[in-house]
Amino acid sequence: MNATRRRFLGLLGGSLAVPIFLRAATPSSRLPIAFSTLGCPRWDWATILSRAAEHGYAAVELRGIQGEMDLTKRPEFRAARLSASLKELDDAGLRLAGLGASARLHDAEPAVRAAQLDEARRFIDLAQRLRAPAVRVFGDRLVAGQPREATIERVVAGLRALGEHAKGSGVTVLLESHGDFCDSPTLLEIMEGAAMETVGLLWDTHHTFVAAKEEPGRTLNELGRYVRHVHLKDSKPDGKGVRYVLTGTGTVPVRDIVRLLAGRGYKGYFSFEWEKAWHPEIEEPETAFPQFARVMGEYLAQARSAGV
């Protein structure tokens, strides 16, 4: 085991609950970082892989390719091309951190709900074929005119249905902290309600800090045992909203979040969710992706030197 691998296994060792499949997921010469393809909406499959390897990423999180958000429709992942795509991933020394579905679990209308669950199941099946460890879904919204608990019960039921579908696949269904489901009490209620090994939490650290106004330490203390994957991004206030900015230049305490996760022994990927597809005005991935890799190298090294 070389010095780089020893260094970062030491940094990331600990007790935070993480599936076994992530414990050896990082190539020995790379940091445990990933980027979401939401940040590079114009790149094709070959470019995604080459840029990820070039900038030292260990993994890629698939959230659409070239504008097609339904990954099950992409030619790279159809039966005739699948083996070649997996070989290209291996040849680049990369793993898949997970797949990002658009499925929402709050909808009450039966036909809409059925379509959302169908999408998530198709993504779980694809993730199994791609050897991807997780599929992200949304709780998304509290339904107007209905009791809060009715929506939460629907989200829990959806997670349990998807968790059952995922059993035996090696895939975990992850609810993202997003939309109306960003605060720790609500997310904890949902996680405790689902209570399945095939269900976990994707901690979008920006949403809990900016939308729910929670300090990261509190969020991690409340939800850490459920966290299986992490999204990182930075922003600054801009009028009534925020503008996404390069990592470490905004008001989101990304450095502290990395330190807290390292201190808790988080063994998953630190995934950069640069929302270029939704916010075309922000910096290009050619700028943002290498900058994130450099900053994360600094943050992880600082966490290690601090003894966490």
Image: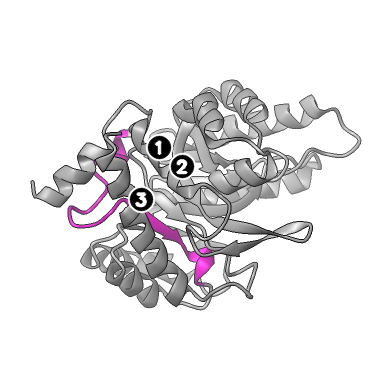
Which residue is rendered at x = 53% and y = 47% of the image? 136
Q: CA distance from mark 1 to mark 3?
A: 11 Å
Q: Where does label 2 land, which residue?
A: 257
Asked whether 204 or 162 is in front, the reply is 204
Sequence-wise, which precedes: disc 2 or disc 3? 2
**Vertical arrangement, residue 195 with respect to residue 132, above or below:** above
- Quadrant assignment, res 156: top right
Q: Where does label 1 land, which residue?
A: 261
Q: Position of residue 93 (x, y in %)?
A: 23, 62
Q: Where does label 3 land, which residue?
A: 299
- Quadrant assignment, res 17: top left
Q: Amino acid at mark 2?
A: Ile
Which residue is rendered at x = 79% and y = 57% of the image? 240
Q: Amino acid at mark 3?
A: Tyr
**Vertical arrangement, residue 299 with respect to residue 263, above or below:** below
Q: Tell me if mark 1 has few (under 14), some (14-19) or many (20+) residues whose alpha carbon lies within 10 angstroms of its own.
A: many
Q: Position of residue 41 (x, y in %)?
A: 53, 73
Residue 126 in view (yes/no): no
Residue at disc 3, secondary structure: helix
- The answer to whether marks 2 and 3 mark residues whose Cβ atoms lie closer than 8 Å is no
Which residue is rendered at x = 42% and y = 36% of the image? 260
